[in-house]
């Protein structure tokens, strides 16, 4: 996990960052519907779970833009080389959830194995953190799913005033429409770090990756296009 400092004077976004972080602190949320018809079919054919595929795809595409990885570390502004997905593990017995995380790996097969290992070892642990021996890493961002509810808008509200610039991502229950399977997806961002342009690039590349499902080819003996 590498942290690269940013200088506001030389960073092209420096003035906008200062304005939306210090002068007029602003956040925003956007909710869209992604077509996961091809992706859902591909993961089922490959015999893998949809949720970790969703985690990996979202994290991969956020990692492609520096602006989504901006953070403060020891009072210094900069960005991490990657983000780590911090997600919820739901407990059927008491209807609570615990937070888990799996470090991002550009190889989906490696990430998937690590995800399954974490679930097997810590998935039944209750409490806020399912992995209490190690706190979430500094580059962890929130990405989750509300599989019981389909929504047209979802907004994450923070009641603590602190310099947090990572995005938060939330998916909803699938929507079946005209033979397509759609996924509601909400993205909540700090305006100091990102604008609509960055969101546009993220959503375009995420949809393209979902349509292609090429990442599944890293699984031994799997053909996602079968």
Image: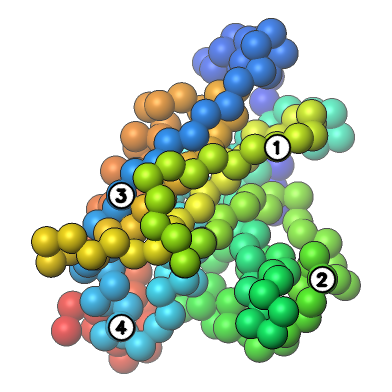
Residue beneath label 1, please? 158
Q: Where is 148 relative to 13, above or below?
A: below
Q: Residues within 10 Å of mark 4 (few under 14, many from 20)?
A: few
Cα–Cα span, label 2 and label 3: 32 Å
Q: Where is 7 relative to 93, above or below?
A: above
Q: Position of residue 88 (x, y in %)?
A: 63, 66
Q: Residues within 10 Å of mark 3 (few under 14, many from 20)?
A: some
Q: Is residue 45 visible?
A: yes
Residue beneath label 3, please? 33
Cα–Cα span, label 4 and label 3: 21 Å
Q: Residues within 10 Å of mark 1 (few under 14, many from 20)?
A: few
Q: Position of residue 157 (x, y in %)?
A: 65, 38
| Sequence-first disc among 2 and 4 | 4
Q: Position of residue 209 (x, y in %)?
A: 30, 58
Disc 1 vs disc 4: which is toward the camera? 1
| 218 on left or right of 213 | right
Cα–Cα span, label 3 and label 1: 24 Å
Q: Residue at x 29, y 72 (%)?
A: 40
Q: Residues within 10 Å of mark 2 (few under 14, many from 20)?
A: few
Q: Residue at x 31, y 91 (%)?
A: 221
Q: Is residue 217 visible?
A: no
Indicate the secondary structure of the residue bearing disc 4: helix
Residue beneath label 4, please? 44
Using the image as rendered, state which of residue 45 and residue 169 is in the foreground: 169
| Sequence-first disc among 4 and 3 | 3
Q: Are marks 2 and 4 in contact (CB under 8 Å)?
A: no
Count of residue discs: 4
Disc 4 vs disc 3: which is toward the camera? 3
Residue beneath label 2, please? 127
Q: Residue at x 28, y 68 (%)?
A: 39
């Amino acid at each position: 996990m590498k942290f690269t400092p940013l200088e506001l004077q030389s960073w092209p976004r420096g003035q906008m960052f200062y304005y939306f972080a210090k002068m007029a602190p602003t956040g925003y949320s956007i909710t869209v519907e992604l077509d996961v018809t091809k992706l859902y079919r591909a993961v089922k054919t490959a015999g893998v779970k949809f949720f970790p595929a969703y985690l990996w795809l979202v994290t991969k595409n956020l990692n492609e833009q520096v602006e989504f990885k901006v953070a403060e570390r020891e009072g210094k502004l900069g960005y991490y080389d990657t983000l780590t997905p911090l997600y919820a593990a739901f407990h059927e017995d008491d209807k609570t959830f615990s937070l888990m995380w799996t470090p991002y790996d550009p190889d989906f097969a490696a990430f998937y194995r690590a995800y399954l290992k974490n679930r097997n070892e810590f998935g039944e642990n209750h409490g806020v953190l399912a992995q209490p021996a190690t706190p979430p890493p500094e580059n962890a961002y929130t990405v989750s799913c509300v599989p019981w509810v389909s929504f047209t808008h979802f907004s994450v509200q923070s009641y603590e005033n602190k310099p947090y610039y990572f995005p938060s991502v939330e998916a909803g229950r699938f929507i079946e429409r005209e033979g397509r399977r759609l996924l509601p997806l909400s993205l909540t961002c700090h305006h100091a770090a990102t604008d609509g342009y960055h969101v546009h690039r993220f959503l375009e590349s995420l949809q393209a990756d979902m349509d292609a499902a090429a990442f599944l080819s890293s699984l031994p003996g799997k053909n996602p296009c079968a």
